[in-house]
Image: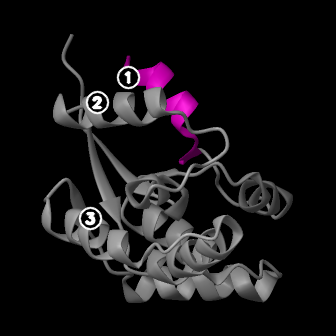
Amino acid sequence: MNYMKLNVLLDSTYILPTFGIEVEGLTDEDIKNLREICIMGKVKFYCSPVIWIEVLGKLYRESIRKGINIENIINKATKSLLESNFYTWIQPSPQAIELAFKLRSLGHKDNIDNLLYAISITNNMIFLTMDTELKNFLQEHNIETKNIIDHHILLKKLT
């Protein structure tokens, strides 16, 4: 079967396993399957540098919570994310920043999610996230949410 390659912008949740951080609702099998659909050419994964703000906070909290030194993992994981060419890194456009500001003005306080959603919309991408709060907010304000899905839906669609 011939698939059209889907462009998929990843929420920071999908980056955390690279640092050895377990994410509730995201299994090793899910990660393996996401990797497979990318290798098979069914998707192209994109990341935005804005995720580093969230990732750094989560890495710090997780290292404190588990009492582990994560610093030795950070360099290798970061190099893998930035240099492997598995992910394409994308900056927000002026239109995306304008849309993110509009969402903030409407009351959605998570600026990272606002930016990621806006990047996905202005680049005609799927926004892969498990965060239902943003989707609910957008629906309450009659803003398009068809492009927001989680990995379960993506994998069901492509496998």
Disc 3 to disc 2, how far (Cα)? 17 Å
Q: Residue at coordinates 52% horizontally, 84% vertically from top-left?
A: 53
Q: Position of residue 55 (x, y in %)?
A: 51, 74
Q: Position of residue 51 (x, y in %)?
A: 47, 75
- Quarter placement of the N terminus: top left
Q: Is residue 75 left or right of residue 60?
A: left
Q: Amino acid at mark 2?
A: Ile
Q: Nearer the viewer, residue 60 or 96?
A: 60
Asked if marks 2 and 1 touch (Cβ < 8 Å), the reply is yes
Q: Nearer the viewer, residue 39 or 18?
A: 18
Q: Which mark is residue 81?
A: 3
Report the magenta residues as a range. 147-159
Q: How many marks?
A: 3
Tell me which secondary structure the magenta stretch mostly adopts: helix
Magenta includes 149? yes
Precedes in sequence: disc 1 or disc 3: 3
Q: Quadrant of residue 24?
A: top right
Nearest-to-viewer mark from 2 and 1: 2
Asked if marks 1 and 3 touch (Cβ < 8 Å), the reply is no
Q: Which residue is mark 1?
A: 158
Asked if marks 3 and 2 touch (Cβ < 8 Å), the reply is no
Q: Which residue is mark 2?
A: 37
Q: Quadrant of residue 123?
A: bottom left
Nearest-to-viewer mark from 3 and 2: 3
Magenta includes 63? no
Q: Amino acid at mark 1?
A: Leu
Q: Residue at coordinates 36% horizontally, 31% vertically from top-left?
A: 32
- Crowd band around label 3 with a 10 angstrom C-alpha radius: few (<14), some (14–19), many (20+): some
- Crowd band around label 1 with a 10 angstrom C-alpha radius: few (<14), some (14–19), many (20+): few
